[in-house]
Amino acid sequence: MRRNTRQKITEILCALLVCACIGTTGCGSSGSGNNNESDGAQDAAVQEQEAAPEEAAAGETTEEASESEAAPEETAREFVTINDLEDVGVIMNAPVEFDQTKGLISFNGMDVSDGEGIYELYANYIGVTIDEYNELASKEEYTEEELLEYQGNIVPLFTILAIDENRTAEDLANFVNETEEEEILAADDLKLVGEGGDCSFFEYIGENAGDDNYSNLREEFAKEYDTLISLKDVLVENMEFSQIKRPYTDIIGSKVSFETTDLNGKPVSSEDIFSHNEITMVNVWATWCHWCVEELPELEKINSRLAEKDCAIIGICGDAENLELIEKAKGLLEESGDTYLNLCPWEGWMDSFDMSGGWPTSFFVDRNGVIIGQPVVGANLLAYEPSIENLLDRIKTEKEAAAAAAEETEPAAEEAKEVTGSAYNIYVVDQNAQPVEGAMVQFCTNDTCKVAPTDAGGLASFADPEGVYEVHVLKAPDGYENNDEIYKTKNTYSDLVITITKQ
């Protein structure tokens, strides 16, 4: 028997720690969705409802009332706009019943593929009132029985899976099934309901996890849920779809540069920190964040293992902004046995480290100070080392490709030197060590920059005086991904190879 897909997707979400329920392992907002429970009508709907009785009283005659009785029962349906899934490409034009519930509705949407362009959007009905929910959520501790009772009142309304780059239902099913021993999702389980940009949105129409919870609903909530389910297709049919922006695209590939102090007041700079390790994991945490503090002892153990791979962990305590909180942070680290470097925040630090996904979030930075790979949101101890291993493999592959490219292009470099005299030769190649023509290479001193395109051999030469220059690919040609990493030349004439990825 096929395990049901909702369970699988939930497992993926839990692995990424972007959970919507009480008992989550991250603090703050989720990466690309909202966890809002609907507990009030939209202003427009309220105004419309309040105006309706007055209009009827003022203008309806006995004759008009009789005609109204004789008219067909079907009336124009009222809709409200719900924006809870806007960040993941969906605006809901929902029947007003979805906004006037006694129970709660939780709309959630997030990336479930570690930045590979696959998303889950779903809605759950929760058979409790907002007061009951707040009472449980406000407790510092709650019993397992209380938690199970709450979870037992959660029933699904809809699940939509989205995939970008004009990929198909088959591609989506393959993603879900690729790590499973047996198929748990078939393309036939997915119904195309909309498209936005290069994203396709599929409603999951197979079996839903949580259906068994229906019998747990109190009578009034069961009736309300029945009404919502009867209107679910209307809700989906009236959704507006748009392109989903992959998370963290604004910071991946950007260079981090800062000067600050550690928690002991010692001045430190980004260049000093990152240049010592192949990859540095930057764990951003706060003293108020329960899950941040919970994982501190394990982070020390991971840091010890990473040292063998020329990698390390550093921390940024995001709320260590005054002496009292600095001392609190130091105390928590001491209790946890943490010895790795922890920094105080600096002005504008969130421009480099985007914390919109929640606390803690861990970022991966190479020895050049460039953020690489997808950040890990939440206290996901099982994800840190595999993420670093994958990035180390990628760096190794890129270095091997660059070395191969340098060997292949060495004769061309000598020829270029004969033509141009002494020069810096910048070669741009793809991941297969093939030359890339038409890449715009920027070559900068402290004061000025020059730009030149690469030729058919992937070469751009700069016959400037010897010195240290900053070089990067200003614009990759069509069909290639931009590489925003900034490279530095030697202080003598030499060759430099830059690898960009062919799409």
Image: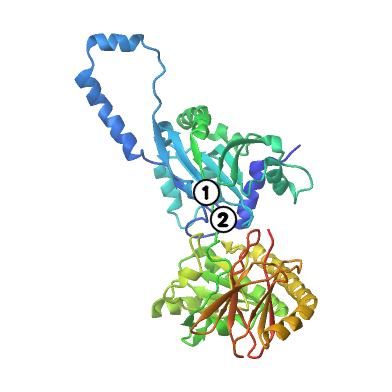
Q: Is residue 102 visible?
A: no
Residue 82: quadrant of the picture: top left
Camera-nearest residue between 487 and 461? 461
- Identity, as a three-letter code, of the amino acid under mark 1: Val
Q: State the residue in front, 181 or 407.
A: 407
How many numbered callouts?
2
Locate residue 266 relative to residue 313 in the image: left or right.
Answer: left
x and y, in percent, of residue 244 in the image: 54, 50
- Reply above or below: 446 against 141: below
Query: Mark 2, residues whose alpha carbon is within 10 Å: few (<14), some, or many (≥20)?
Result: some
Circles 1 and 2 in contact, beta carbons < 8 Å = no
Residue in front for this viewpoint, 427 or 166: 427
Q: Note whether 465 is above or below 411 in the view shown.
A: below
Q: Which residue is mark 2?
A: 246
Residue lying at the far front of the rendered structure: 419
In which quadrant of the rendered view does residue 296 lie? Answer: bottom right
> How far separated are the C-alphas under marks 1 and 2?
9 Å
Kind of residue sitting beneath label 2: Arg
What residue lies at 41% left-to-right and 43% top-to-bottom? 130
Q: Which mark is residue 88?
A: 1
Colouring: rainbow
Q: Where 377 sits versus 105, above or below? A: below
Q: Secondary structure at mark 2?
A: loop
Indicate the position of residue 485 as horizontal and vertical percent values.
Answer: 60, 73
Which mark is on residue 45? Answer: none
Find residue 102 and report its horizontal and vertical position in percent.
41, 36
Q: Is residue 278 left or right of residue 111?
A: right
